[in-house]
Image (cartoon, rainbow, N blue to C red):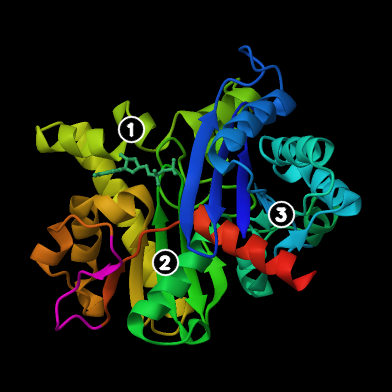
């Protein structure tokens, strides 16, 4: 099937066209500064996409559109075929993901107007985590806040965690449903998931994508009282939002959100960069210890996304701390550059450490094709 994958942000639209029968990418692109440039809105951005598709596809036609939707709330645990009711349900989740879901809805509506007969599928970033048990998703705050506002852990990066778990199972030669492991998705945003029997049972991102690991610009876990303290010092909610989501993490500690530059700076003797990397690696090592317990003994530890797939120094400094678990890296395998799924641990390591390149677009395309085929 020919699938158009849309990742619609508030001022950007990322797209890819894939042929799922060959698992190939026909074209891809990114339209930025929507609303600020000659591209006035998402509908105009789609006009551009349509022109590009005309050039590439000739007389072939699209079979479906798959949307990356950030928040599926408590309702969506699976990809769904979009109709008006589903679109409104996604829109009702806007308060939970104010930057993302409105943009996703704009993308869906723009496609509906342009190609009313083309099936659309929503694939949710939260869906994989819907299997978390209540003791993992509950915060220890009054139940009223959950009932009134839906405050609970949702988790994100689900499409990637699920895809990578399946690929890891394949590499280990077991069924996806037999996989017990720990998956660390380390990109600009970063999260780690405890996977048991192929299902998410805990994950480090929470009510929003701010909780958990040290990220490019996000703090991850901090004492919530810091916010109260700063509020009393005169910080507004907007200031705090900027601080924790955009000016913290690696950027807050070193001035750059980029792992490669941070590593280069540390290699050149920059102490701020070195301590930032240590904070990030230590945080991740602690989560790995915790999730080893959560899954009752992981069968594998998996690294993925930009940092997980490429930053061998960072992997090394994380796994160095896991000696007590008997996990060790093969230095040459860890340093080797490759874009293949691979094992990087020693023969004697208690469990394999894997690097599995993530491919969220491939996962969205597959999920979209499956949903559309089920409805035919
Ligand atoms: P996003 O969340 O934006 O999709 P990516 O998964 O692309 O992010 O990851 C971006 C991060 O990966 C950046 O911090 C970048 O520095 C890091 N990265 C990419 N390539 C390398 C590399 N060769 N070595 C170290 N870090 C890398």
Going 77% across and 35% down the picture, which residue do you hit? 110
Q: Taking the image as drawn, is residue 46 in sight?
A: yes
Q: Secondary structure at mark 1?
A: helix
Number of the label disc, if any, that sits on residue 1: none
Does 326 appear above or below 46?
A: below
Q: Is residue 346 magenta?
A: yes
Q: Secondary structure at mark 3?
A: strand
Number of the label disc, if any, that sits on residue 122: 3
Q: Secondary structure at mark 2?
A: strand
Asked if disc 3 is less than 8 Å from ligand 1, the answer is no
Segment tinted magenta in the rendering: 340-350
Going by the picture, which residue comes out furthest to the right?
85
Between 330 and 48, the residue placed more toward the observer is: 48
Q: Quadrant of ligand 1?
A: top left
Query: Residue 34's x, y, as percent?
Result: 63, 21
Q: Is residue 93 magenta?
A: no
Measured Cα–Cα span from mark 3 to mark 1: 36 Å
Give the total of numbered labels: 3
- State the residue position of label 1: 253
- In this picture, residue 68 sits left or right of residue 292: right
Q: Earlier in the sequence, mark 3 or mark 1?
A: 3
Measured Cα–Cα span from mark 1 to mark 2: 25 Å
- In this picture, residue 297 sits left or right of residue 349: right
Going by the picture, which residue comes out furthest to the front?
59
């Amino acid at each position: 099937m020919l699938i158009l994958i849309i990742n619609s942000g508030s001022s950007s639209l990322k797209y890819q066209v894939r042929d799922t029968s060959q698992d190939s990418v026909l074209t891809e692109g990114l339209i930025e500064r929507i609303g600020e440039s000659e591209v006035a809105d998402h509908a105009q951005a789609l006009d551009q996409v349509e022109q590009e598709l005309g050039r590439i596809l000739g007389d072939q036609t699209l079979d479906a559109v798959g949307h990356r939707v950030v928040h599926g709330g408590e309702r969506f645990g699976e990809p769904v075929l979009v109709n008006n009711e589903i679109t409104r349900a996604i829109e009702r989740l806007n308060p939970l993901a104010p930057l993302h879901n409105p943009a996703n809805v704009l993308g869906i509506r723009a496609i509906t107007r342009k190609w009313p007969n083309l099936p659309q599928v929503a694939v949710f970033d939260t869906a994989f985590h819907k299997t978390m048990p209540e003791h993992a998703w509950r915060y220890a705050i009054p139940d009223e806040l959950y009932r009134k506002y839906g405050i609970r852990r949702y988790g994100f990066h689900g499409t990637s965690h699920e895809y990578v778990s399946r690929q890891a199972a394949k590499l280990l030669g077991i069924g996806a449903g037999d996989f017990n492991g720990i998956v660390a998705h380390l990109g600009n945003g970063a999260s780690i998931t405890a996977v048991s029997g192929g299902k998410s049972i805990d994950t480090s991102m929470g009510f929003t994508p701010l909780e958990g690991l040290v990220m490019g610009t996000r703090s991850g876990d901090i004492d919530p009282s810091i916010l109260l303290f700063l509020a009393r010092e005169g910080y507004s909610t907007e200031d705090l939002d900027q601080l924790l989501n955009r000016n913290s993490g690696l950027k807050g500690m070193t001035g750059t959100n980029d792992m490669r530059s941070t590593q280069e700076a540390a290699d050149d003797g920059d102490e701020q960069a070195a301590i930032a990397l240590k904070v990030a690696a230590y945080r991740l090592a602690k989560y790995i210890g915790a999730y080893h317990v959560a899954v009752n003994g992981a069968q594998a530890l998996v690294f993925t996304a930009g940092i997980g797939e490429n930053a061998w120094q960072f992997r090394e400094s994380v796994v160095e701390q896991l000696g007590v678990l008997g996990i060790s890296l093969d230095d040459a395998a860890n340093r080797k550059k490759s874009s293949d799924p691979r094992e990087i641990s020693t023969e004697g390591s208690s469990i394999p450490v894997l690097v599995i390149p993530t491919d969220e677009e491939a996962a969205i395309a597959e999920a979209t094709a499956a949903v559309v085929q089920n409805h035919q």
